[in-house]
Image: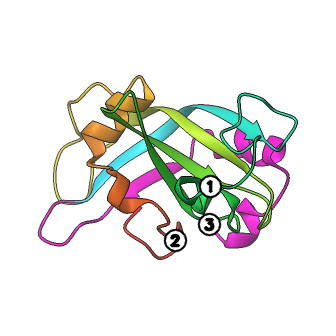
Amino acid sequence: MSHRFFRRHTLQVAPDLLGCEVWVRRPGERVRRGRIVEVEAYRGFDDRACHGWRGETPRLRTFFGPGGHAFVYITYGIHAMLNFVTEGPDYPSGVLIRALESIPAADGPPLEADMRGPGLLTRAMGITRGLDGSDLRSGPV
């Protein structure tokens, strides 16, 4: 998908992501794939559930960047959460990927891990905080 896709209004992007595939490519590992089946949208300074509603911090720098990048944060000190940044720079908005359905990769069978939950899917897909800021068009996610 193009950056233009992600730089639209968050409430347009979120439903359009349903059915799309997430691929994670890492050198020396097989490609991991999943189909998006559940999402949650967060938008702006008025949305108190949105991480960025109080303003930008170093941890939220990616979330305040341009649409089309992965924002990965850790919750409860354990679980990585995968978000796709939407809209434009300096406006906190994004879509949390809540669940994936496993699909076969070209180089092997589908993942057998449970991906019905944001922490479970990141564990199964090998998504870590190190992928924060990845370009969704050309990066490993």
Of callouts 1 and 3, the N-terminal one: 3
Dot 2 amino acid type: Asp
**Left or right of 27, for residue 116:** right
Classify mark 3: helix, strand or loop.
loop
Q: Nearer the viewer, mark 2 or mark 1?
A: 1
Q: CA distance from mark 2 to mark 1?
A: 20 Å
Question: Residue 1, which numbered label?
Answer: 3
Residue placed under numbered mark 2 in the picture: 135
Q: Nearer the viewer, mark 1 or mark 3?
A: 1
| Crowd class of label 3 (few under 14; some 14 to 19; many from 20; radius 10 Å) | few
**Left or right of 121, for residue 9:** right
Q: CA distance from mark 3 to mark 2?
A: 11 Å
Out of 85 and 91, give the one closest to the viewer.
Answer: 91
Residue placed under numbered mark 1 in the picture: 57
Classify mark 1: helix, strand or loop.
loop
Asked if disc 2 and disc 1 are in contact, CB closer than 8 Å, the reply is no
What's the magenta region?
A: 1-30
Q: Residue at x 44, y 31 (%)?
A: 118
What x and y, as percent, mark residue 104?
28, 46
Dot 3 amino acid type: Met
Q: CA distance from mark 1 to mark 3?
A: 28 Å
Q: Residue at x 36, y 53 (%)?
A: 129
